[in-house]
Image (cartoon, helix red, strand yellow):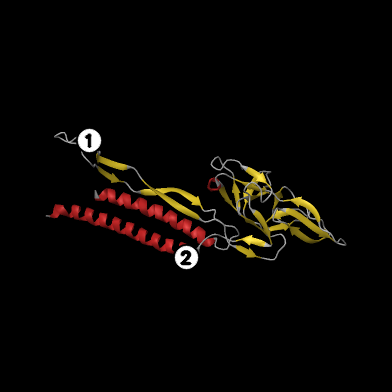
Amino acid sequence: MSVQALYTAATGMEALQTKLDIISHNMANLNTTAFKESRANFEDLFYQHEILPGIQDSIGNVTPTGISIGLGTRIQSTQLNFTQGAFIDTGRELDMAIAGDGFFQIVDPSGQILYSRAGNFSINANGDVVLGSASDGRLIEPAINIPQDTTEISISPEGLVFVRQFGQQQLSQIGQIQLAKFINNEGLLPLGENLYQQTDASNPPTVIGNPGQNGLGLIRQTFLEASNVNAVDELIDLITTQRSFELNSQMVQAGDQMLQLVANLRRF
């Protein structure tokens, strides 16, 4: 049985190492715009059943319990937490945060629609609004083009985009920001660069429309959504993970000592 303990404890150490990787990823993205933290979900492995509960013993009595020995644990899934992050006032006209549910729609160079909660938009050389830096940014969908003589950009909570051009007193509407909503945000595939891709688990968006309608959030201009990682919670999780790893390593040592005792029996 001590040999099995070695393998069982090893599964715990392997799973905890993966959890440590997830915690490290969360901590590394404390300052990433609209980053959503991940958590590790564990599940127990198969059991070695020596006596099944409910079977009859030698005198015909039904056993109330059995003998089942677990074989360890593993990571079942990594789950994204899409709770709202705090808002940071940047004062920048093309910074936008979503107050509520929804994702910005972003066009990948391949033409595929991706999704993002980050709202750090810029203007490229053609005047198009893009996510990220102007040099390598991806176009927002629907496309919005800012005239070259624009002196002011105003975005309403409902996603209406207005500009004031040089020599004009009135604002002119030039576009409409639309958001996408999914029935299962946790089913989205994180791609990096603050982008997500729809999957069979998330299904296509259930709603694509103007902010504030059909359960979609509102746009907050000059704000960015911060990461929702809680540093204190992550540090506590780090400590408990480290201690759990140490306990599993002690189980390996205990199993090794038991095997050593068995090996030394031949000397007596």
67 relative position to 224: left or right: left
Near-viewer residue (58 or 26): 58
Which residue shows up at 69% across the image and 48% down it?
210
168 relative position to 101: left or right: right
Residue identified by numbered label 2: 232
99 relative position to 10: left or right: right
Which residue shows up at 44% across the image and 54% down it?
18
Amino acid type at mark 1: Ile
Question: Marks 1 and 2: in contact by CB < 8 Å?
Answer: no
Image location (x, y in percent) of residue 156: 72, 56
Name the mark on residue 55: 1
Q: Secondary structure at mark 2?
A: helix
Image location (x, y in percent) of residue 128: 76, 53
User: Sequence order check: which comes first, mark 2 or mark 1?
Assistant: 1
Q: Residues within 10 Å of mark 2 (few under 14, many from 20)?
A: few
Residue 207 visible in this rendered orientation of the protein: yes
